[in-house]
Image (cartoon, rainbow, N blue to C red):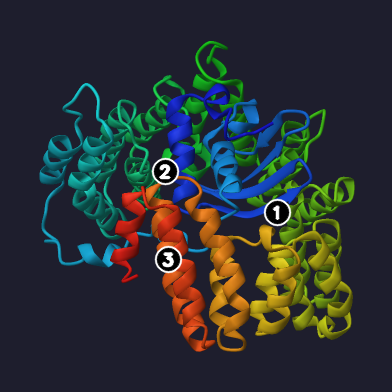
Amino acid sequence: MPWLDGLHDLADSRTVERGRAYAERGHVVEVVENGDRLSAVVRGTDDYRVELVAATESWFCDCPVGVTGAFCKHCVAVAIAAARGGPRDDPDDTAVDLARYDDEPADIDVTTLADEVAQVFRPRRRSYDYTQANAYADEAEATVGRLENRSRETASPELLTVVQAAIDHAVRAILRSDDSSGAQGSQIERLLDAHRSAAAHVGLDRKAATKLAEWLFRFMFDGRQDFFVVDIDQYADAVGPDGIDLYRRLLDNVGDDQAPGSAVRHARGRLAILSRDPDEIIAHFDVDPPHLVHVTDLVSALDDAGYTDLATEQARRGVAADPGSPFVATLVDRLVEDAQRHGALDEAARLRGDDFRHRPSTATYAAFERVAIDAGTWAAERDQADPILAAADPRGWVSTLLRRGESGAAWAAAETLPERIGLDLWRRLFRAQVRIDPASTLPHYRRLVDEAVVIADRRNYQTAARLLRSMRDAAAKANRSAEFDTYLASLRDRYRRRRAFDDELRRCGL
């Protein structure tokens, strides 16, 4: 099905906007198209694996929302990114530089911080549109930074409750906000990280530990929100055995109408990990019918519980069961890391080679190359790997050739399937080819410009104008400026009624 056309039938408007923000900010990576099947990784709170199958109009994402069968924001992001030709080459760096808050006064007491949190985070509107939501996040940014710093450096039980208050207020605000930019959501994730950090460094008495356990339960199961996750096992030392027992009793009383079954199952899985009982862990995660996502969760749970060898055994079982699935990647990574840790470099290279042959892509090729170089086997493997990648992922093959400095071969490969090479990759090709044979770039510049201006849109005009500026420089190097001038004149004449196009040409000095 045309995923982009059906987004608003598959997901609500808030989910669509969040997915669009993820796609715009470059969170979609490792996009692989195999016939009518799209698979990708979306980087969010964690790396989530998405699969969209057009023929059966089915989808899957291994995030807490996606595993319920919902068309989540990660599915939306993949649909949008794929329609635009794959992942962006320049994802936004959304990391926060905490050093910019280092000059904040160190003697701000917790009471003052609590007052600041109440003033800054408490929602003051019935709803926030896009601009207002960003303004809310901008106003809160300095306070978020202060809470992060204090949680890392001078955590206390009192600070823990202040961070909780900030989280509660911020969640109330985001539920009534157009957070398409993701700014508020990112701040909440940072506050949750700060909360975990503070809890790990404080000693709580029994009453405070009980209150923390109750807050952790309410955050997940009071029905306010279902897109941020806190795991009880990450707070085990802070809440202690009594807090864990309380959390378990509260969870046992959650009704079917109070929370999604997936959320309850996830929480029970974290409690199983805390039990350190391998049979209990396997019984919880090894479900029927099996799916590689569940195997991955089982392996992670066994690792978290300290059963490394058993986790390795389960990872091998999962890879052998469905080696071509996009969801096998995490299991392969786990097995490769285990082999490297034991110095078995040949085994690591074999695992990467098998994974590449079952799931050929730029990402699996690069991973295979790195490990095989370490094992000293790449020279023998490369001749067989290259044609596999070239056939399975032409765009990735061209990008790989450019990475290796083989620009001539990359240009030749791109010319065999020009329509499958995205605009960003063509720009990289142009930069390399103009030094070798500038005249050969002109037909491809013309094709891309013609494609860009077909649809009347200012962004398309901006793209066309930038391409034309580069084309003019290439034509000058090829001594074919007159040919370029003729083409530009014909474009102006053909689109003489599109004033916005002419404005963009003039802005680019054309």
Q: Secondary structure at mark 3?
A: helix
Indicate left or right for 503 with 280 as reference: left
Indicate left or right for 204 with 65 as reference: left
Marks 2, 1: nearer the viewer: 1
Count residues near mark 2 (Cα–Cα under 10 Å), then give few for <14, some for 14-19, many for 20+.
many
Q: CA distance from mark 3 to mark 2?
A: 72 Å
Dot 2 amino acid type: Ala
Count residues near mark 3 (Cα–Cα under 10 Å), then give few for <14, some for 14-19, many for 20+.
few
Q: Position of residue 84 (x, y in %)?
A: 56, 49
Image quadrant containing the N terminus: top right
Marks 3, 2: nearer the viewer: 3
> Which numbered disc flags the more N-terminal residue, 2 or 1?
2
> Which numbered disc flags the more N-terminal residue, 1 or 3?
1
Q: Position of residue 86 (x, y in %)?
A: 60, 53
Marks 1, 3: nearer the viewer: 3
Q: Quadrant of residue 417?
A: bottom right
Q: Position of residue 343 (x, y in %)?
A: 78, 77
Residue occupying image coordinates x 47% and y 41%: 20
Quick check: marks 2 and 1 in contact, CB under 8 Å? Answer: no
Indicate left or right for 56 with 117 as reference: right
Q: Position of residue 465 (x, y in %)?
A: 40, 63
Q: CA distance from mark 1 to mark 3?
A: 54 Å
Residue occupying image coordinates x 63% and y 79%: 440
Count residues near mark 1 (Cα–Cα under 10 Å), then give few for <14, some for 14-19, many for 20+.
many
Q: Is residue 92 above or below residue 23?
A: below
Dot 1 amino acid type: Thr
Tell me, yes or no, if residue 88 can be seen here.
no
- Quickly name the residue at label 1: 330
- Quickly name the residue at label 2: 238
